Amino acid sequence: MADADVIPFDADDRAQQTAQESPPKASTSSTTTRDRGAIPGIPISDWKAAIESGAREVLGSDWEGKLAHALAFMRRRLEGDYTVDEFGFDAELTERLLLAMLRPVAEKWFRIEVRGLENIPADGGALVVSNHSGTVPVDALMTMFEVHDRTGRFLRPLGADLVFRLPMVAPIARRLGATLACQADAERMLTSGELVAVWPEGFKGIGKPFSERYKLQRFGRGGFVSAALRTGVPIVPLSVVGAEEIYPIVGNLPSLARLLNIPYIPITPFFPLLGPLGMVPLPSKWLLEFGEPIRTDAYDAVEAEDPMLVFNLTDQVRETIQQTLFTLLLERESVFR
């Protein structure tokens, strides 16, 4: 190779090349957590602020007070520091738990409109008599909620024998104010000034097919009228529109129902086809109208034994409810609106 082709290479260039080709030496000094800064995460103060914001959003500005009341309620339940009446009714549990749970269903799902609240006595005994529908007694629960929410009075339902034969349902029904639909219990509650409700159609009403919707079934033998006559309390007719459409019954399984010793096993357009999802009620629009009270205090208690009087009053109540149902159906714009 000629001398002219030789590229000059001095000591500084050699040192620079060596530094580029050699890997860097590991540092002998150690790095601590303090040198790196705090461990990444959400500070406790931020967690607290987020929880408070969520509680305020759900419970309102007075969320601390409501939470304190809820904790006190739970403590009393655990310690057994609560009272029930002679029928097993637990007013605090009903108001704080059941009725609170029903509020969004009544207001947002069924959008219940109530009329004739002035016909419910502010105090003293009275007997509310209503049509019955809906495949399961959702109408009873909604009526209980609306009466208490709008008047402050607890509605004490009279339930069928089956309700008190079911292992888990019976104690819950008792705690919520229900008692057996018999004259003895009805008269005891009416005499003590309770607002009592009865659905004389029974299972014939809630289990009837969709093709017979809003056609009242037989009102039994008028036992509720006899109880009202003996106690001298007014009878308040109640007409409920909307419950017929929540579970439209298109069929039944009578053989299986007899095997299970229950009145019926309904088949709806969505149950049992969709399984548990088919048990979600349809969001129909509800109308509740309390009619003018039918007074019974003008009669003597012994007249409760007069079958013609009992029949005539029973028929009067039934016809009042039926005619009001027809009127409400004409006024309703749509099933779901």
Image (cartoon, rainbow, N blue to C red):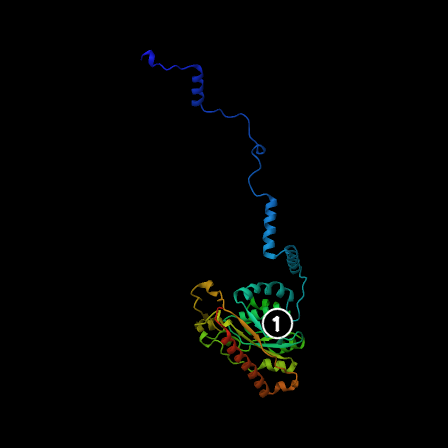
Most distant residue in the front direction: 4
The residue located at (44%, 15%) in the rendering is 11
| Lateral position of residue 12 relative to residue 172, left or right | left
- Using a 10 Å C-alpha cutoff, classify the residue at mark 1 as few (fewer than 14 neighbours), some (14 to 19) or many (20 or more): many
Depth check, front residue: 57 or 305: 57
Q: Nearer the viewer, residue 171 or 50?
A: 50
Answer with left or right where residue 90 lies relative to residue 260: right
Count of number-bearing discs: 1
Foreground of the two, 203 or 58? 58
Location of residue 304 (image quadrant):
bottom right
Q: Secondary structure at mark 1?
A: strand
Residue 292 drawn above or below residue 169: below
> In the image, residue 159 lies at what x, y percent?
57, 73
Q: Which residue is mark 1?
A: 155
Residue 61 image offset from top left, x and y in percent? 63, 55
Q: Residue furthest top?
A: 3
| Residue type (three-letter) at the residue carrying disc 1 | Leu
Residue at the spot x=58%, y=88% of the render? 308
- Residue 92 percent location from the top left of the image: 65, 64
Residue placed furthest toward the left: 1
Q: Position of residue 163 (x, y in %)?
A: 55, 71
Query: Residue at 54% across / 82% down in the picture?
Result: 319
> Which quadrant holds the N terminus?
top left
Asked whether 235 or 7 is in front, the reply is: 7
